[in-house]
Image: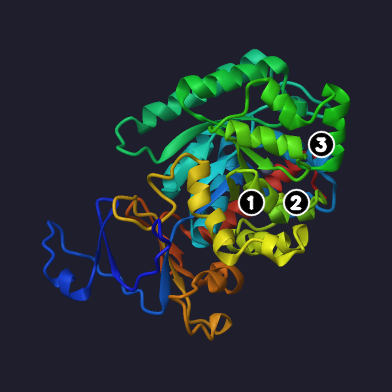
Amino acid sequence: MDDENRVLNTDVLVEQGTITQFTTRRQRSSLRSAAPLEVVDGSGCMLIPGLIQSHVHLCQTLFRGMAEELPLMEWLRTRIWPLEGAHTPASLHTSALLGLTEMMLAGTTTILDMGTVHHQSAIFRAMTDAGIRGFSGKAMMDKGQGVPKSLRESTAESLKRSEASYRALQRSQHNQEVPRLGYAFAPRFVLSCTTRLMKRTAELTQEYGALFHSHASEHKGESQEVQRQFGMTDIARLYQLGCLGPRTVLAHGVQLTASDRKLLSQTNTRITHCPSTNLKLASGVAKIKAMQRAGITVAIGADGAPCNNRLDPWTEIRSAGLLSQIAAPDRAQALTAKQAFALATRDGAKTLGLGKHIGSIEVGKRADLVLVEQNQLHTTPNLDLEADPYTSLVYSTTAADVRHVMVDGTWRIKNRTPTFTDTSELHRKANLHARKLQSRAGLAA
Ligand SMILES: [Zn+2]
């Protein structure tokens, strides 16, 4: 997966977290290396770039199955917000680790996460434990109907706590050549943020070279409420407040108008497509090809466990491909398998400003690599993988086919087993914390 999209039958040499050579077996025997080489046999597999999910909520993993069959605003007000407000640092760490483990077992190596209002350090701690690459930031919300007291903060508090979280993260990353973790300021959406909060956050994003991560244009009802309050679409409102630009990543974009697409394209703002969530919360189908034709970079994300309910990038890639056929019934207008796969690799990397470092397998890039089995019954026959690897990857491959996962040159999943956590202990802790959380939020059955 280099610039020319070549598919190679080769060995890949990784040294100190970087891809340094494509080699043959004969060249390998003559390599001189300070440390003994570890040789991993990839027969029957494809080596792909680590998958990128540019919109997730690790804080919500423990809410899986607790917020079913509700439209977006009711889903937020009656379930998600009370549950987020009931988190402790310990429950939040477990929620994040559960989400990370699920995503990494499926081959995810980079994420853009939105935290909850409090305890942001617990999320960064879990991301460090798992060794994933990515961005997160505490959710910011200083107004809005139905926001519980536990999550409400003043404008000044929200800005101060976000800056403090940013600084704490910077201190922990200072000696890394390519920092694995970055900060993403996260005003939740225009209905939950004042003008001052949005404007100042856009300034902070620029000052610190961070990301701006929010939701926009998701559900019809939400868009109508935005129109009622501001007399314009949320994209126009974000533009007016100076919040659009190449460091801004907005989840959804289901309700975009043609003029919204123009604004996003002019400002080089990125969109994350979350197809499963858009279906489950009855928001609709985002028009990916129309966005791409307008020049917008689109990536992909599983969003949160209570609105999906998986955090599986393969489901999202496949859904994006399938749904593009409905959004554009003319075959020529739908996503090809290669384009669908790019959402989670090249386009994801570009979305996060990491195109130079990740998103493809090229000499000089960081070694975020996934070995996926291609000799399963459900991927057979598969006679000409080198000519077209994408059809098998997008439409036949599942998360369970991922064998090994490397981030920054370190194995994080080996033989389908995480190297950073004990899954049976994680399972036990997740159930325990979920039960307590549900009762603290007043939602226990
Ligand atoms: Zn979301």
Compare marks 3 and 1 and give the one earlier in the sequence. 3
Q: Secondary structure at mark 1?
A: helix
Q: Which residue is mark 1?
A: 432
Residue 308 appearing in the image: no
Query: Residue 122 vs residue 190: left or right?
Result: left
Mark 3 or 1: the one toward you: 3
Label 2, label 3: how many angstroms apart (C-alpha)? 18 Å
The amino acid beneath tag 2 is: Asn
- Along the line of sight, the residue nearer the viewer: 6 or 78: 6
Q: Position of residue 216 (x, y in %)?
A: 72, 36
Residue hosting label 3: 77
Q: Quadrant of ligand 1?
A: top right
- Identify the residue under disc 2: 278
Q: Are marks 2 and 1 in contact (CB under 8 Å)?
A: no
> For this rendering, which residue is in front, 276 or 362?
362
Question: Where residue 211 is drawn, which disc sits there?
Answer: none
Q: Give the residue displayed 82% in from the left and 29% down from the top.
A: 226
Nearest-to-viewer mark from 2 and 3? 2
Give the image location of residue 262, x and y in percent.
68, 36
Neighbour class for label 1 at 10 Å: few (<14), some, many (≥20)? some
Between 90 and 82, the one lying in front of the other is 82
Q: Residues within 10 Å of mark 2 (few under 14, many from 20)?
A: many
Q: Cα distance, mark 3 to mark 1?
A: 24 Å
Looking at the image, is mark 2 or mark 3 earlier in the sequence? 3
Proximity of marks 3 and 1: CB atoms separated by less than 8 Å: no
User: Which residue is at the front of the view, 112 or 141?
Assistant: 112
User: Residue 444's x, y, as percent?
Assistant: 79, 47
Asked which secondary structure carries label 2, the reply is helix
